Each structure stands twice: as structure tokens, then as C-alpha cells.
Amino acid sequence: MLELLFEIKLAFSLISTAILGIASYTDLKKGIIPNKLTFSAIFIGLLLQLITAFYFNAFEYFYFALIATIATFLGGYALYRLGVWAGGDVKLFTAIAAFNPVNYGVLRDFIGLKQAFFSSISLPVFPLTLFIYSVFAILPFGAMLSIKALIERKAFREKILTDLKKRIIQAAFFSMLLVSLAYLLELLGFQSFLAYALLFVLLGVYGLIKWRLKHAIPVLLFFWGIWQNYSLALNALIIFAGLVLFYALIALFIKSREEVLRKKIKISNLKEGMIPAETIIKVKGKVIRKKGINISSMIRLMLQGKIAQLNPKIKGRVIADSRKARGLTEDEINKLKKLQANGLLENEIEIKLSGPFAPTVFLAYLIASMAGDLFWFLIL
């Protein structure tokens, strides 16, 4: 029975690899991910999960797949509305979620990585894992951008260092709080999923506290914890180092991406599919230009609970929308040119420079298949 289950997981992984391979080819060649591929993959994936559930009389397989598929679509659609993802990216991630609600780790098992931190979490969080690994998969490209920006731009270099100092302090408090709360929940007898859920809730409550001296909480808890178990100090140090390294790499990539992957061009030189980095609105005969929200701003607003500001209502007629990852249409370009010809708009617009996303997801899937849920074990 276990052998058959492994063969099914292997089949799902091979199908997912084929889907990502085809999507990567079409994304590189034509800049699109076909709807026929993604829609059929979503349907077939859920159908095969249902058949598997009936065969093993274990419907958690199907429930996990359904939960992962719906959650992935909703999360992806939110990113689509914010202009971070294109429609094809949303459907591709949803299709992979239908086949992979959890991390099967086929390459890991094939290679023989048996260490605990290479294992998989039996929860339907694989799409989120894949998204995180996708970020890591583009780090080499991000590193080149970061080095270039750090060398050429003094203001950017100072901005990164100032922000990093603040994040180091935050990482220290978070590390102390995390290990202390985890140890406390363990002493109280909470285990497995319930312990993780309570840990996330408690961390969230701490984040909402506005008390000026709230950092005293993790410090006091931590010293109490190491008084009980000195090994917590080492755990906190490992988490702290991982968080600082992770933030340094991600922040460098995101901020340099925002600095470097933007370009000002003449409106007369616009082409269909180019993605505007600003929203241009016509209100009562006047033209208003608004900078599009970037990734770091989006994360900051989410952490501050200001979700409504991620997708603010716009009054007036939108000519170019930075939140639409599909890029400008020919009709929108003609309207911009008309505004420029009538003297209502300068002959310049900032655009985002982007590349195909599917190959990055393909690489991330292979990494996840080998590394398992290593990221979660490092964090938790």
C-alpha cells in the first residue's frame, strides 16, 4: 500500500513537472501561459485527488487538495489585483496546488535525504512553500541587481544599511519570543498542529500590541526560558542568524528590483504589453499620476493591518493602471499619446521591466522536491 502511495505521489510530481515545463516554454517563447494548460490541469488534478481519496478511503487527500487549490487561487488573485502577478501566474500556481497540496519530496526520497529537517509538513501549505522557494530561485538574479545598485547608488546603499540595522533588532526580539513561546507551549502540553496554530496566534497578538515597552515581554520570557533550558539560547541564535540572512537577501533583492527594474521612456515609444509603474488617471479634464505600490510597501501595509490601502478606490477614468500585470493595451497607449499630444501629459512614463515567471516556479518546484519543507523547519 505504501509503495502504491509513493507511485501516486511520483505520478503527481511528474505531471506537475510536465505542466511547469510546458508553461516555462510558452512563457519564454510567447510571454503567455495557456488557459487550456492551467484550467485542464486544475480539473484533472482535483479529479485524480478525488479518485485517490476513494481508492484509499482517505478523503483528507481530496480535502487538502481542495483547500490548497482554493486558498492558492484567492491568494494569487489578491496578488493579481495588486498588479504583482499576471492572470496566467495565478492559474499556474492554482494548478500546481491541485496536484500538490503537500510537499511530496520525490527528489528528496530518491536522493536519500533522510534528515528530519528535509522532511515534509503534513499540512496543505505547499503552494506557500513553493512561493517562498520561488523567491529564493531568483536570488542569483537579485544578487546581481543588488550588487549593481549598491555600487552605483550611494543613497540606496545608505537606505539598505539603515533599514538592516532596524531589522537586526527586530530579528533579535522575534527570535527570543519565538523560542520562548514554543518552549512554553511544549511545557503546557500542546503538540503538533494545535501548538503551531497557538504559536501563530500569540505572535500575531504580540505584533498588534502598541505598548512602548512591549519588547520587555520577549526579553523576560527568553531569560525565563534559558533559566529552564539553556539550549534555547542556541536555538534563538540559529533563528536570529537565519532571519537576518533571509531578510538581508530578500530586502536587497526587493529593494534593488524596485530601484533597477524600472525605466523611464517616452510615451511615443510605448509598446503593447509594457507594464506601467505609475497609474495615470483623468479627472475633470486634469491628469493625475500616482506611483504604483511596490512589494516592500505592500508587505509593510499588510503587517500594519492597512489592507484597504493595498487596493485603494480610484476616482476618475483610469488610462494606465500599474496594478494590471498584463501591461498596456493598444487602446490605452493611444489614449496616453492623445493626452500627451494635447499637452495634458509629459512625454515620459515610468515602466516596470519584468521577465518570464514560469521558469522560476519550475526551478523552485525542483528545489522544493529535494529540500522538502526545510524553510518551515528553520523558521519554526
Image: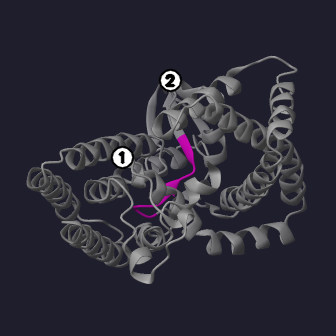
What is the quadrant of residue 148 in the picture? bottom right
Vertical arrangement, residue 190 with respect to residue 379, above or below: above
Q: Residue furthest bottom?
A: 111
Question: Range of the magenta residues?
Answer: 271-279
Spot occupied by residue 224 in the image (x, y as percentages of width and height): 84, 32
Q: Would you say the residues marked 2 and 1 are in contact, meaning their CB atoms lie under 8 Å apart?
A: no
**Residue 328 in view here:** no
> Circle 2 sits on which residue?
284
Question: Which residue type carries mark 2?
Answer: Lys
Q: Nearer the viewer, residue 117 or 259?
A: 117
Q: Secondary structure at mark 2?
A: loop
Mark 2 or 1: in front is: 1
State left or right for residue 306 relative to residue 249. left
**Residue 102 in view here:** yes
For disc 2, the neighbor class at 10 Å (few under 14, some 14 to 19, many from 20) is few
Based on the picture, tell me whether residue 277 belongs to the magenta stretch. Answer: yes
Spot occupied by residue 236 in the image (x, y as percentages of width and height): 78, 48
Q: Earlier in the sequence, mark 2 or mark 1?
A: 1
Q: Nearer the viewer, residue 34 or 347?
A: 34
- The residue that appears at 50% across and 60% down in the rendered structure is 373
- The residue that appears at 26% across and 59% down in the rendered structure is 99
Based on the picture, tell me whether residue 83 belongs to the magenta stretch. Answer: no
Looking at the figure, which quarter contains the N terminus? Answer: bottom left
> Circle 1 sits on which residue?
72
State left or right for residue 161 relative to residue 19. right
Spot occupied by residue 11 in the image (x, y as percentages of width and height): 22, 72
For disc 1, the neighbor class at 10 Å (few under 14, some 14 to 19, many from 20) is many
Vertical arrangement, residue 185 with respect to residue 30, above or below: above
Vertical arrangement, residue 277 with respect to residue 81, above or below: below
State left or right for residue 251 relative to residue 13. right
Spot occupied by residue 323 in the image (x, y as percentages of width and height): 48, 44
